[in-house]
Image (cartoon, helix red, strand yellow):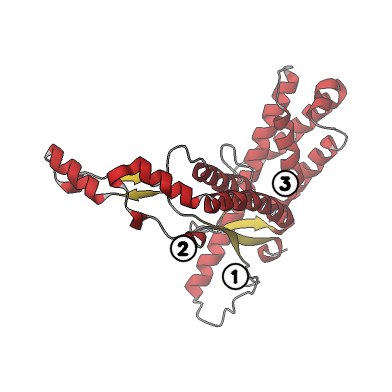
Amino acid sequence: MKLNEKAVLVAPVLRKWNPRKVDRRLAREMADKYGVHSDMVSASKRLVALNEKSFSNLQTIDKNIRNHCFYSVGLGCTGFCVPFDGKGWHLLPTELHEKFVARFNGYKDKRERIVKKILDDYDSIVKEAKESLKDMFDPSDYPSKAEITGLFECDYKQKVLNEEGYIGSEGNIASDPRFGVSGAETAEVQTRERSAIEIATGQATLKMGALLTHLADCLKEDKTFRDNSYNKVAEAVESFESWNFNGSEELTKVSTILKEAIANIDGASDLRKDKDKADKFVEASEEANAILDNMEGII
């Protein structure tokens, strides 16, 4: 199966009004005060009061969208994609597309509620800022109510790869290779494909190995572990085969072993209470990790 049949490209579109602004006048005053060149000094001011939490909540939501929808590898990341080209595009397995959309829309709903609160409170936010900033307040720093409404956006772009390996246009319409795509560009796209496949497979196996090792070690040594330790393993097992773009028999075998291992496990508490299930899970984890270890240097 070709990559265009197993994955699409997605990129986040997250825009918001920035409640900070460079204040060049303040920077000049500081430079004059300390007798230094103005190029050596920069200054910025907050345009909203520190106790206005909506903007920090918005920043948190945007971070969660990136970490839990797009980024699949990294500390605390549970997303569905891997980087594709270093320009914001991410490779998303089609089998995970529905889950990606559901999770993204969940965060989008939360974000829109925060934006609505900002817009509803905007007049009072500006009034409070005027009181806090005193002589540093500049009304031109603040867009009108109509203008600021258009400064917020939460969406994602999507592209496809056609059979020849060319990047398609947005909206799932593949671009025609006969129009303005050179052989060099084709080779570049195909190189990115191969690199993305290697990254996707490699990161999926490394992540799986780390999750299995942590939980198996806790069970073998009778250590306390959080419910999330098992939940992460279960989620990774469920999506693992989606990253097997090359149809590796070894990765398919790992997926089968682990799916069978967790089929009769009803959450983390089940592993804590049932030693037989815990022992079988440890055995399956070690078998799976042995296969993954033997694949190092091949992936």
* Label located before the other in sequence (3 or 1): 1
Asked whether the residues under the numbered discs 3 and 2 touch, taking CB atoms below 8 Å apart as contact, a structural biologist would say no
Q: Which residue is outermost to the bottom?
A: 178
* Label located before the other in sequence (2 or 1): 2
Asked whether the residues under the numbered discs 2 and 1 touch, taking CB atoms below 8 Å apart as contact, a structural biologist would say no
Name the residue type under label 3: Phe
Query: Measured from the top left, where is residue 113 in percent x and y?
Result: 62, 50
Q: Which residue is outermost to the top?
A: 222
Helix, strand or loop for disc 2: helix
Q: Which residue is mark 1?
A: 170
CA gap, disc 3 to disc 1? Answer: 27 Å
At label 2, counting other C-alpha atoms closer than 10 Å, the crowd grade (few under 14, some 14-19, many 20 or more) is few
Q: Residue at x 50, y 80 (%)?
A: 180
Q: Residue at x 55, y 48 (%)?
A: 62
Asked whether the residues under the numbered discs 3 and 1 touch, taking CB atoms below 8 Å apart as contact, a structural biologist would say no
Q: Is residue 188 left or right of residue 9?
A: left
CA gap, disc 2 to disc 1? Answer: 27 Å
At label 1, counting other C-alpha atoms closer than 10 Å, the crowd grade (few under 14, some 14-19, many 20 or more) is some
Q: Which residue is mark 3?
A: 240
Q: Residue at x 33, y 43 (%)?
A: 133
Query: Measured from the top left, where is residue 121 in percent x and y?
Result: 52, 49
Query: Measured from the top left, where is residue 215 in percent x and y?
Result: 71, 28
Image quadrant where one finds the N terminus: bottom right
Query: Measured from the top left, where is residue 141 in percent x and y?
Result: 36, 55
Q: Which residue is mark 2?
A: 147
Residue 299 visible in image? no
Name the residue type under label 1: Glu
Q: Is residue 237 left or right of residue 9?
A: right
